[in-house]
């Protein structure tokens, strides 16, 4: 820019010197020879002035007395036709007053800007922004003003693009903050769409979600009523969302009135006067589960710029929608476990007083067992009732009870996570780098909030290598990473940098999370992963790293920290490389038919015993139930040939399920033994096989779980074990 300005000034000075250097005799009556020389000199001068890239004009008063060829091109009129015309005819009306003020100030020798901008309008009415300079000169022996004009259209366009891009970035940042401010996107949807309107105009905005073969409008905002409001459902087939699902990319329709490609939803939009739309896919685990849609009354309202901006936001919108769906499900459930949650909270307060992991584990195991017994009865009774009732309202209520019991089982598993007593592995093959990227996206709103509200700048960099395949639970691993990153943020009260790296070492995937924070003193490093240990004065429960430790342990890995006070910290997570390329868990196929069996049932809890017996009988089996293990074993010994399979509880007062299995195998080794247990997630499969246990069903159990396990162990009609 400085070089251009210097060239601009040099051009002006050259032109002025040429004018002022003309001998005054050229402007008196010349002789024939002098006249010819004058013409030659003027011709050479014009050639020189025409050759410069700027517009050059000389005016006296308000009239043009000289103009170069670039001036003629700019104003759209031959040079000879410009001479004598008023210069102000070619200044845009909105710029005339300001330009005249500068010109008049120059004439009176007042201080004026060296350069300024104005707008020129040509004969065809086209406006061009220019940078202009005035210079007093002597032309043809009289005072005049030389004007040098430079077209700044390209610069103006570039400046406008920069302004627009900056505005888009500001809006995207604000949208990120808005999305992170509520668990239910519908609560902040109006604020969200209002912010989008600052950079993309629309008359209607909506989020449509796929629900089987239907499409449900989850959230709607705008000034136009279309008949497709929040909660409305239309067929998925033939809709724009179906197209987006198939091709996994955005769809832009420029004008419905010219060509309606998707009549299912466009007919409603056309009736409301809407003419164009853009639909952006929302992804979950690589699949499209919905679309974010903007529609406008104007044709050709959306193009590549709008697509680019909306696709940048689509990931955040998708995550917010998924969180909303989970939040809505949780909010809508009316279950009977509120008292159990209160008891768990009371137990939590009691456990805070003790730092003994062993005591915590024992208590968690006992609570889990008792809860699972209660949930087994609730779930079993609900499923039995579902098998005989036809009343829709009763079915709906029973489904709520059934789901609440299942959710209660998940709560028990979370309790076992805190106590580090879970060993179950229900994993799928994951790319750890993808898990890291998802986790960093989840922490981004908090980082931006701290930057905006607390003025704390924290940079997060991810240096990921090639794809790293592991077996695991993506949700649990994301929880580990977000806990560590949040702790790192809290450890940097003045801001800093967090770096996440991944690499492959032999058969291990190693992930490191490094911060430049306060570090961890040596005296507390060994207690970081203890439950309820926290260094935060307020707001910390001390559960984050304890849960992380348990999760990584369940994944067959390890977690460690390298740190010293004042020098930041690095957490190292090691996980085994995946040994397969597909999902670990496969459901057994249902055989065409299985043998109707005679089953010996042992369960010391009468209510659970009755539920089990009724379920097994509903499945078509003959069941003989006992609440006392010794009585059951005596009966089996007398008629062992009469029983095909034994189903026993694991934790009984007089005799454990292990002892029952061992005795059964001693009496009749070929008899299959199934254990029903509230400790299923803690049992070692190898140890169970050694004592003669052929299968385990965790409490609370479902009728389907019982059927699947029996199908696996009982002979089929072909006389072989079901696979």
Image: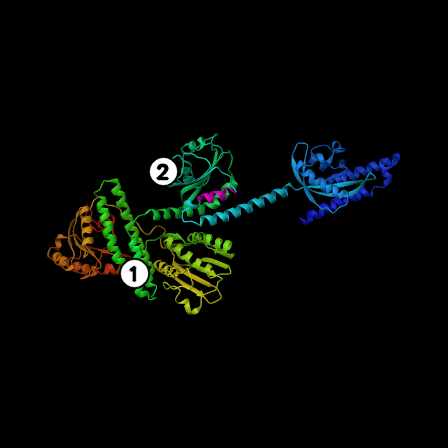
Which residue position holds label 2? 214
The secondary structure type at the circle numbered 2 is: strand
Q: Earlier in the sequence, mark 1 or mark 2?
A: 2
Q: CA distance from mark 1 to mark 2?
A: 43 Å
Q: Nearer the viewer, residue 571 or 292?
A: 292
Q: Nearer the viewer, residue 646 or 395?
A: 395
Specify the farthest residue to the right.
31
Query: Which portion, as a residue range, is magenta?
Result: 189-198
The secondary structure type at the circle numbered 1 is: helix
Res. 407 visible in picture:
yes
The percent position of residue 19, horizontal first and vertical second, equals 80, 41
Label 1 environment density (alpha carbons within 10 Å; few <14, some 14–19, many ≥20) = many
Q: Looking at the image, is mark 1 or mark 2 nearer the viewer? A: 1
Q: Nearer the viewer, residue 442 or 170?
A: 170
The percent position of residue 308, horizontal first and vertical second, equals 50, 43
* Residue at screen point 24% across, 40% down: 391
Which residue position holds label 1? 364
User: In the displayed structure, does residue 309 sit left or right of residue 396?
Assistant: right
Q: Vertically, is 527 above or below 115?
A: below
Label 2 environment density (alpha carbons within 10 Å; few <14, some 14–19, many ≥20) = some
The percent position of residue 267, horizontal first and vertical second, equals 42, 31
* Residue at screen point 12% across, 54% down: 641
Q: Which mark is residue 50?
A: none
Tell me which corner region of the image, top left, top right, bottom left or bottom right, holds residue 649. bottom left
Give the number of marks: 2
């Amino acid at each position: 820019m400085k070089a251009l300005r210097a060239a601009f000034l040099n051009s002006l000075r050259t032109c002025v010197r040429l004018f002022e250097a003309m001998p005054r005799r050229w402007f008196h009556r010349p002789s024939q020879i002098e006249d010819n020389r004058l013409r030659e000199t003027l011709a050479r001068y014009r050639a020189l002035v025409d050759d410069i890239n700027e517009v050059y004009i000389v005016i006296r008063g308000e009239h043009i007395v000289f103009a170069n060829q670039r001036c003629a091109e700019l104003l759209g009129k031959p040079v000879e036709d410009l001479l004598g015309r008023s210069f102000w005819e070619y200044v845009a009306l909105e710029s005339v007053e300001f330009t005249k003020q500068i010109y008049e100030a120059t004439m009176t020798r007042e201080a004026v800007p060296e350069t300024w901008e104005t707008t020129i309008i040509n004969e065809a009415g086209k406006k061009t922004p220019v940078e202009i300079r005035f210079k007093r000169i002597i032309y043809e022996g009289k005072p005049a003003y030389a004007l040098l004009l430079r077209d700044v259209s390209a610069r103006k366009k570039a400046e406008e693009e920069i302004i627009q891009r900056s505005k888009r970035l500001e809006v995207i940042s604000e949208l990120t903050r808005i999305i992170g401010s509520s668990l239910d996107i519908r609560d902040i949807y109006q604020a969200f769409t209002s912010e989008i309107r600052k950079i993309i105009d629309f008359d209607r905005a909506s989020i449509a979600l796929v629900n089987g073969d239907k499409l449900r409008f989850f959230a709607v905002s705008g000034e136009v009523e279309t008949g497709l409001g929040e909660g409305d459902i239309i067929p998925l087939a033939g809709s724009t969302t179906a197209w987006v699902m198939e091709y996994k990319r955005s769809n832009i329709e420029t004008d419905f009135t010219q060509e309606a490609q998707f009549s299912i939803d466009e007919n409603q939009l056309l009736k409301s006067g809407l003419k164009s739309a853009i639909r952006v896919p929302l992804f979950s685990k690589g699949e499209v589960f919905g679309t974010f849609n903007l529609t406008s009354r104007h044709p050709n309202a959306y193009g590549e710029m709008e697509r680019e901006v909306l696709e940048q936001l689509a990931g955040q919108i998708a995550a917010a929608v998924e969180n909303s769906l989970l939040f809505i499900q949780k909010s809508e459930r009316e279950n009977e476990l509120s008292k159990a949650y209160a008891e768990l909270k009371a137990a939590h307060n009691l456990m805070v007083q003790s730092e003994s992991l062993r005591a915590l584990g024992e208590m968690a195991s006992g609570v889990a067992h008792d809860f699972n017994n209660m949930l087994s009865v609730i779930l079993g009774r609900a499923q039995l009732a579902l098998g005989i009732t036809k009343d829709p309202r009763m079915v709906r209520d029973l489904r709520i009870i059934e789901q609440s019991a299942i959710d209660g089982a998940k709560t028990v598993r979370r309790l076992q996570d805190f106590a580090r007593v879970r060993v179950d592995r229900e994993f799928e093959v994951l790319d750890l780098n993808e898990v890291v990227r998802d986790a960093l996206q989840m922490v981004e709103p908090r980082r931006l909030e701290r930057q905006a509200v607390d003025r704390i700048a924290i940079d997060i960099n991810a240096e990921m290598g090639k794809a790293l395949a592991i077996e695991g639970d993506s949700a649990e691993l994301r929880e580990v990473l977000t806990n560590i990153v949040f702790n790192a943020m809290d450890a940097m009260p003045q801001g800093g940098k967090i770096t996440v790296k991944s690499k492959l070492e032999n058969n291990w995937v190693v992930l490191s999370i490094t911060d430049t924070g306060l570090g961890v003193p040596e005296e507390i490093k060994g207690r970081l992963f203890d439950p309820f240990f926290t260094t935060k004065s307020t707001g910390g429960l001390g559960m984050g790293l304890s849960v992380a430790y348990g999760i990584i342990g369940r994944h067959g890995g390890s977690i460690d920290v390298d740190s010293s006070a004042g020098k930041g910290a690095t957490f190292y997570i090691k996980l085994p490389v995946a040994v397969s390329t597909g999902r670990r868990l496969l459901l057994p196929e249902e055989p065409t038919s299985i043998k109707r069996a005679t089953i010996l049932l042992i369960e010391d809890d009468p209510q659970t015993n009755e539920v089990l017996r009724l379920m097994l009988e509903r499945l078509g089996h003959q069941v003989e139930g006992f609440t006392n293990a010794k009585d059951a074993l005596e009966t089996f010994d007398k008629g062992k040939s009469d029983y095909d399979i034994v189903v026993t509880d694991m934790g009984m007062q007089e005799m454990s399920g292990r002892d029952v299995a061992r005795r059964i195998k001693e009496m009749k080794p070929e008899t299959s033994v199934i254990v029903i247990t509230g400790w299923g997630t803690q049992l070692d499969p190898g140890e169970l096989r050694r004592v003669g246990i052929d299968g385990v069903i965790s409490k609370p159990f479902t009728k389907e779980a019982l059927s699947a396990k029996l199908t696996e162990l009982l002979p089929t009609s072909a006389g072989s074990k079901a696979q």
